[in-house]
Amino acid sequence: MKENSDYSNIINVILSISLLLSILIIFYQNVGLPLYQSNLVGKAVGFAIEDRVETVGVTTVYKKPGGSLIGTQPQGAKGTVVDGPSTANSIIWWKINFDSGKDGWVKETDIKKVGSTVALAIESCSPDKATALVNELVTWTANGVSGGSPPYSYSWSGTDGLSGTTNPVAKSYATTGTKTASVAVTDSLSKSANRPCSSGVNVLDTQLPTVWVTDSLTRVQPTDPPGSVTAASIKAARNEYEAFQVVVTAPTGVSLNNVNATVSDLVGPGTLPTSAIALYREHYVPVRVQLPATV
């Protein structure tokens, strides 16, 4: 009987220790002291770094797992996972870089995955004009920036000291020639993408000629000021011919050189192919004797 009593005492001690440990664990949890562990290893989790996520409801954002509150995000707020998983108070936490508003740690149960982060990319880079004059403002734009983790930052470089951190960026040039540019875009995770602009700007030191159109019967004199019409409108029935004039007027005091012209399909309610179009260059014929008003 004494042996059985000893066994009972041992069992009671073990039960008391187990009960004490349970009480201590509950106490620490209830008083809000976080049982914090960072960088869980080997635990199955629902997210990965650079995953795109979305809040499933109004979500509280914390400074650290189980720490102080720093703000909230509305339902449907999107962001990118940048750290985690970590655990505090037996809750799994992830650090989210939201597209807008407060960034920080949120509970795993407050977010859902909406995709993985797509690689940062720049669709194109281009100037707002192909030709400019000296000291004329040229605007360069990075188009179709996507992927990565917003927000983005920009860094421009190019001919004649082009630089800037905005998109678009503007510069005027004091010298002539072809000017080029390139842009580097960096996201909030420090991932970057670079793209040179596909076309440059030809900077000239003189005014550009004016190109305008008029009907086929108007006499255009060399000293006539340029017109304002730049689109021709013609009408003709089948097997008829119709014409219009394209006039290139040089700026005052400037000579025209190396003027070339090509034709393309004429498009309107119908399309007139280039095979049906004839291009002629007009010449001036000196008329030294004026014809009488009536012949």
Image (cartoon, grey):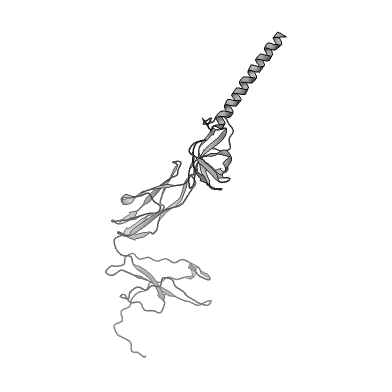
- The quadrant of the rendering that contains the C terminus is bottom left
Tell me which residue sits at (62%, 23%) in the image. Answer: 19
Tell me which residue sits at (66%, 16%) in the image. Answer: 11
Instruction: Say whether residue 102 is left or right of residue 4.
Output: left
Choose top left, top right, bottom left or bottom right for residue 28: top right
State whether residue 116 appears in this view.
no
Residue 173 position, x and y percent, is 31, 56
40 up-or-down from 224: above or below: above
Choose top left, top right, bottom left or bottom right for residue 115: top right
Choose top left, top right, bottom left or bottom right for residue 88: top right
The residue closer to the viewer here, 137 or 264, is: 137
Instruction: Say whether residue 9 is left or right of residue 152.
Output: right
**View extreme (right): residue:** 1
274 up-or-down from 195: above or below: below
Residue 224 position, x and y percent, is 32, 76
The residue closer to the viewer here, 195 or 58, is: 58
82 up-or-down from 168: above or below: above
